[in-house]
Image (spheres, rainbow, N blue to C red):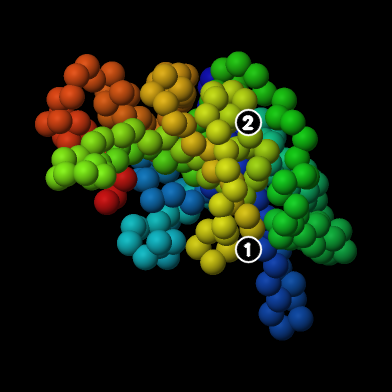
Amino acid sequence: MKETRFAYVAGLIDADGDLTISRSASSGYVQYDPLIRIGSSHIPTLKWLVAKFGGYFRKTKPVDGRKSFYIWKFSSDKHASRFLERVYPYLWLKKSQAEVLQKYYSLIGTQNPTEREILAHQIRKLNQSESHTTNTSRVSLTGKMLQAYLAGAFDGEGSCYILRAKQSKGDSHYYRASVSFGSTWKAIVVCFVKKYGGCWRERPPHNFGKLTMYQWDVRDNPTRLKFLLYTLPYLITKREQAKLVLTFIRIKGSNPSLRESLRQGCCQLNGR
């Protein structure tokens, strides 16, 4: 398998995944369950994960009240451990959680409840950390690996669409392509700026969250074109949207009918 696939899925995990150890107690017995999960409403992405890495996906409660939502994960700890070993070199934001999980998987076949409890507490503390602006070192990936990683992150938390807005005067409309990425991790948003240009800004917490949001935006078509051309080969979830936006950017002249057709295509793909 191409190494860029592991870089891509690492970006997807960092943006939209979950590395954790669940803990449940019943009748004095404590049970631990190490988990590698990715949530998505895009079934082709989930099928791709199963085809490339194994595991399975199941339907769960929608996160936005509208779209069907699914969770991909492994049924075997040994399988999950092998997967994590391959993906680990490409993780960035959740590398510390991955290190804790690796230690937990090394306990397979042993009891050691004290160590399991310690590791479960460590990963829970990491996942609850609010220091998302300072607790990550610089990403070590470069070239195609970085492009694949950022594509995975973009598939998880990015946005790619065509906007139609009314002119300030009169009844006419204008169209504009939009490419953006949002995260509570400032480091990865800044990485988008350094790699592709554009700018970033702070936003209030999203969906009743507590953490500050950071958003990467692109305000000119040459930068959008650069980002899409470098990223498109690795995209899965937002691949078709990216193709439509790329076609939109390349239109010569006004051509409102084509622009409207491309906008509607993006709306359908984005579920609006």
- Residue 109 seen anywhere in this rendered image of the structure: no
- Residue 27 seen anywhere in this rendered image of the structure: yes
Quadrant position of residue 99 = top right
Q: Position of residue 27 (x, y in %)?
A: 71, 83
Q: Nearer the viewer, residue 58 or 188?
A: 188
Q: Position of residue 178 (x, y in %)?
A: 38, 36
Which mark sits nearer the N-terminus, 1 or 2? 2
Residue depicted at 60% across the width and 16% down the height: 143
Looking at the picture, which amino acid does disc 2 mark?
Cys
> Secondary structure beneath disc 1?
loop
Q: Which mark is residue 210?
A: 1
Q: Which mark is residue 191?
A: 2
Looking at the image, which residue sits at the far left?
257
> Secondary structure beneath disc 2?
helix
Asked whether, in this view, residue 67 is left or right of residue 101, the answer is: left
Q: Which mark is residue 189?
A: none
Quadrant position of residue 187 = top right
